[in-house]
Amino acid sequence: MREALLIIEIGNSSTDIAVFQQDRCLECLRVPTISLASLRDIESSLNELLQRHQTIRVAGVCSVVPRLTDLFAVALKELFSMRIVGIDSTLDLPFRFEYSPRESFGPDRIALLAISAGIYPQKAVIAVDIGTAMTFDVLDSSHRYRGGMILPGIDLMAFSLHDRTARLPLVRISDSASLLGRSTESCIRSGIYWGCIKQVDGILGEIRDFLQTETGDTDVEVLMTGGNCRMVASGLSVAVTVDEHAVLKGAGMLVGMNSA
């Protein structure tokens, strides 16, 4: 059996620290990214988990926060004596892509596309991450990258309305939002929720049409992840596969591919 791996996904809002063995998540800890301000904070977040998994010697780090990428590297190497595989575009990948500049392609997007290719080996895939930002990335059935989109996410839209106006409150968005609101709060809630649902529905439809026209792919899967993925998926008119751990799994897959 393949040895267990430590996989760390550092996002703008939250950081997941997980132990994987093959494609199975044995344990996962989620902490607010803002709480990881120092080496001591990182050591504390890692220590208890690694006490329970003392044989781990390899860690994969998938980070969109450069400052924390460096801090985690120091902690893992110096405090826990681990070898680190950073998720980036220089790794051997299970898909082909062109991007400019190539090194700017987000590690979370790389990991999500990797697991998409692994789950759907002969199908076109739309990989969607509903997080602080919403990203859409597309593989055709030969697993060639066709392009993507980056949009503001639900929480970012809510924060922007509050931050850039004098009187609009900061509202928590939920999938219980009615179509039409009868207060300022409920109008914001319905506007952001239903605006996001219709936006995602429409984009998925346009990408399906694009794939059919450009590549002849008519059998297209949608893999959705991210902190708000279940809320969005529940309102869509099309079927999607939801996996909150998809980026972690993709990072683990890439560490396995690049650790031989």
Image (cartoon, helix red, strand yellow):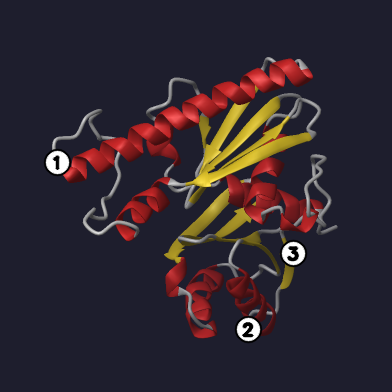
CA–CA distance in space, label 2 to label 1: 52 Å
Which marked residue is nearer to the observer: mark 3 or mark 1? 1
From the viewer's perspective, is residue 216 above or below residue 251?
above
CA–CA distance in space, label 3 to label 1: 50 Å
Label 1, secondary structure: give it: loop
Q: Residue furthest left?
A: 182
Residue that carries the numbered disc 1 in the rendered image = 183
Q: Residues within 10 Å of mark 3 (few under 14, many from 20)?
A: many
Q: Earlier in the sequence, mark 2 or mark 3?
A: 2
Q: Amino acid at mark 2?
A: Leu
Residue in view at x 45 percent, y 47 percent: 153
Horizontal and vertical percent position of residue 243: 52, 39
Which marked residue is nearer to the observer: mark 2 or mark 3? 3
Asked whether the beta carbons under mark 2 and mark 3 sit within 8 Å of each other, the answer is no
Q: Earlier in the sequence, mark 3 or mark 1?
A: 3
**One can see residue 107 in this view:** yes
Q: Nearer the viewer, residue 238 or 205?
A: 205
Q: Earlier in the sequence, mark 2 or mark 1?
A: 2
Q: Amino acid at mark 3?
A: Val
Residue that carries the numbered disc 2 in the rendered image = 79
Horizontal and vertical percent position of residue 165: 29, 56
Q: Amino acid at mark 1?
A: Ser
Residue that carries the numbered disc 3 in the rendered image = 85
From the viewer's perspective, is residue 36 above or below residue 14?
below
Which quarter of the rendering shows the C terminus?
Answer: bottom right
The quadrant in which residue 237 appears is: top left
CA–CA distance in space, label 2 to label 3: 16 Å
Residue in view at x 63 percent, y 52 percent: 108
Residue in view at x 54 percent, y 54 percent: 26
Q: Residues within 10 Å of mark 1 (few under 14, many from 20)?
A: few
